[in-house]
Image (cartoon, rainbow, N blue to C red):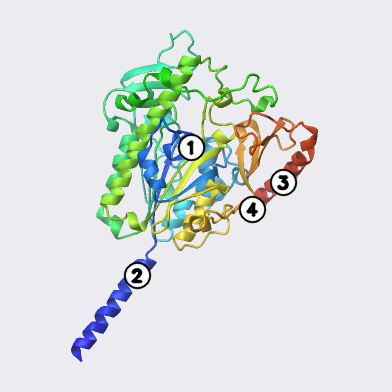
Amino acid sequence: MIMGSMIWLISDFSCAAENEQRTQPYNVLFIISDDLTANALSCYGNERCQTPNIDSIANRGVRFTKAYCQGTYCGPSRASFMSGFYPHATGVLGYKSPRESIGDLPTWSEHFKNHGYYAARVSKIFHMGVPGGIEDGGDGADDERSWTERFNSQGPEWRAPGDGETLENNPDGLKPVVGGNTFVVVEADGDDLVHSDGKTAAKAAEILRHPDRKKQPFWLGVGFVRPHVPFVAPRNYYQPFLPYDSLTLPHRLADDWADIPKAGINYKTSLNMKMDLRRQKKAIGGYYASVSYMDAQVGKVLKALDDSGLRDKTIVIFTSDHGYHLGEHDFWAKVSLRDESAGVPLIVSVPGQEPAICHSLVELLDLYPTIAQLCGLEIPPHVQGKDISELLVSPNETVRQAAFSVAPMRKGFLLREERWSYIQYGEDASGGIELFDTANDPEQFHNLANAPEYLATVKRFQEDLKIKLTEIRDNKLPD
């Protein structure tokens, strides 16, 4: 009789332990790169730039092929996905914190913090200036109340010792290496820890290995600043891309800009940057080396997660704040609303779920409600994104007819459907419009906006845009 009772008690205890383990909330590891195009990742098809550590997340998760940011430069994009609002709902169209606009409404990490999570960031999650803010080691436009703890990762950036060259506006080669938002390549002396991202990986690994991570669920944001300019990385990361002349530039058309409005010509081009073919290829090499360096730091963070024994209890997300042009249409950098700039890599790995590829249109804004739902938290009513958790189980489903993005510098708006990419400059279209049939013109070379046979399509998009902006602005914010 006593033995039977013991067996019952042990069995009951085992069931209780199993239930507790099953209902324990997931941890969240959010890894974000800065200015990263999906086209530079091997899991998205790049054969020259190998990114084995990011690929390893894709091998365990769902890789999205049509993910879009909500702002095509750092400030509005990061304020958007962290606050849960589109940029035109908060008015954060530049480089400031959304806190003044959202009042006491919780940001993404703050929502988890309010529900018992340890919430921390290492380096750039909200906006920080690069390179200036990284050189200074300050908090930038960060929101202090979003975090239990926060850590910055100071680095030398363009001042790093090594062999450097300014590629932008330097046709005679006389300009020294300079700071600012400038295309500069530095093949740097020293190891990974000389630079900001190496320090970020080390700090994130320290946090993940801390015994407290097993005692309390966590939301950890790890923000890498590469491959944002300057393209700075230790020398060994450049070796796979030498000589630079071996690198290939994107396919281009003569008179490519002839059928697009002036506002559609990106703010950085091969022409206005005065970059000849040699410098353009070196820019790609510097970018790829920066990506390879960043990928190696991702690997260190993932190893620490594995060492902690928490991988099977942690949702891992990898993305970027927006995309980046690497010479497509003779465009460089961000801001543009073409796919290379508005599109982002997005990989979400949930323990126990099968790896897959998802072609549904999604937005970075969808991360806040989706991860909240997966962790058993209520989705705050103010959040404007969609819960796309069903796509992690059924990746062939579709959750959006269109993705929406903006380029406030150009008063530009993008509605990206499965087939069509519609871009409008000015709410009244006074700056011009672009329409691309991406099924037949995936590289977006031929603007159809003024063709008579597509006038009905343009009109439909103009109406859709008015409705979208009204919906965004009608969302209630604190007085």
Residue 20 is marked as 2
Which of labels 3 and 1 is toward the front? 1
Which label was assigned to residue 475? 4
Q: Secondary structure at mark 2?
A: helix
The picture quadrant where one finds residue 263 is top right
Left or right of 379 in this view: 286:
left
Q: CA distance from mark 3 to mark 2?
A: 47 Å
The numbered mark, 3 or 2, whose residue comes first in the sequence reads 2
N-terminal of the pair, mark 4 or mark 1, is 1
Q: CA distance from mark 2 to mark 4?
A: 38 Å
Name the residue beneath numbered marker 1: 38
| Label 3 sits on residue | 464
- Disc 2 versus disc 4: nearer the observer: 2
- On the rendered image, what quadrant is the N terminus found in? bottom left
Which is nearer the N-term, disc 2 or disc 4?
2
Q: Amino acid at mark 2?
A: Glu
Residue 333: image location, x then y, percent:
52, 28
